[in-house]
Amino acid sequence: MLNRRHILLAGISAAALAAMARLAIAGPSEKTAATTFEVTKSEEEWKKLLTSEQYYVLRKHGTERAGTSPLDKQYGPGTYACAGCDLPLFTSDMKFESGTGWPSFFTTIPGVFETKKDFHLIYPREEYHCTRCGGHHGHLFEDGPKPTGLRYCNNGVALKFIPKSAKA
């Protein structure tokens, strides 16, 4: 038999579940507007500097379509830098063929990324951003090759490839 206590407990439970679902969907908060990076620009400045695809990925946390980046098949010697601020992020010896359709790396140059949980899909993922400009690059997975077992799955449009000079 239902009584007031059952109805009250059901209401509290429903409210708690709704609050937890909202947190799971929203995920952790973004860095506040007060957070500054070494390279900081207005949205209009970013739009002028970047292509529309770069802006979508780096500034709006978008994802390019798999298999569309020529950098996925780039295996020459060189360095991969942030397309937003030119910070060197990876070297060619850190890259591997993941079969995903995105440039993938098993490690990074130390100190170039910050990570956070991304709850935009049903399950949480680890998202990584450039420490110099805050640009979104991709997601980190634990299905990469030895020695790290990691896969930095990077959007190609978020990168610039700088070939190693023949003189070096």
Image (tube, rainbow, N blue to C red):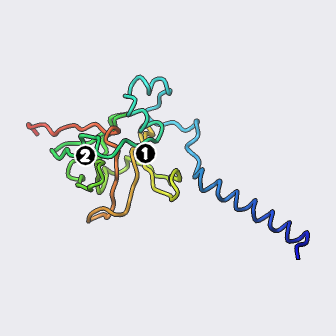
**How many other residues sit within 10 Å of disc 1, few (<14), some (14-19) or many (≥20)?**
many
Q: Is residue 61 above or below residue 22?
A: above
Count of residue discs:
2
Q: Spot the residue most to the left.
A: 167
Q: Which residue lies at the image location 29% right of the left edge and 57% below the top edge? A: 106
Q: Which residue lies at the image location 35% right of the left edge and 39% below the top edge? A: 158
Q: Quadrant of residue 126?
A: bottom left
Between discs 1 and 2, the one toward the N terminus: 2
Of helix, strand and loop, which one carries label 1? strand
Q: Position of residue 63 (x, y in %)?
A: 40, 43
**How many other residues sit within 10 Å of disc 2, few (<14), some (14-19) or many (≥20)?**
many
Q: Position of residue 144 (x, y in %)?
A: 30, 62
Q: Is residue 65 above or below residue 121?
A: above
- Which sits in the foreground, 113 or 55? 55
Q: Quadrant of residue 18?
A: bottom right
Q: Which residue lies at the image location 33% right of the left edge and 46% below the top edge? A: 66
Q: Amino acid at mark 1?
A: His
Label 1 vs label 2, nearer the camera: 2
Q: Spot the residue most to the bottom.
A: 1
Q: Quadrant of the C terminus?
A: top left
Query: Horizontal placement of 72 versus 13: left or right?
Result: left
- Tell me the number on the disc at residue 23: none
Q: Amino acid at mark 2?
A: Asp
Of helix, strand and loop, which one carries label 2? helix
Q: Which residue lies at the image location 47% right of the left edge and 28% below the top edge? A: 41
Q: Quadrant of the N terminus?
A: bottom right
- Badge 1 vs badge 2, beta-carbon distance below 8 Å: no
Q: Which residue is mark 2?
A: 72
Q: Which residue is mark 1?
A: 129
Q: Position of residue 39 (x, y in %)?
A: 43, 32
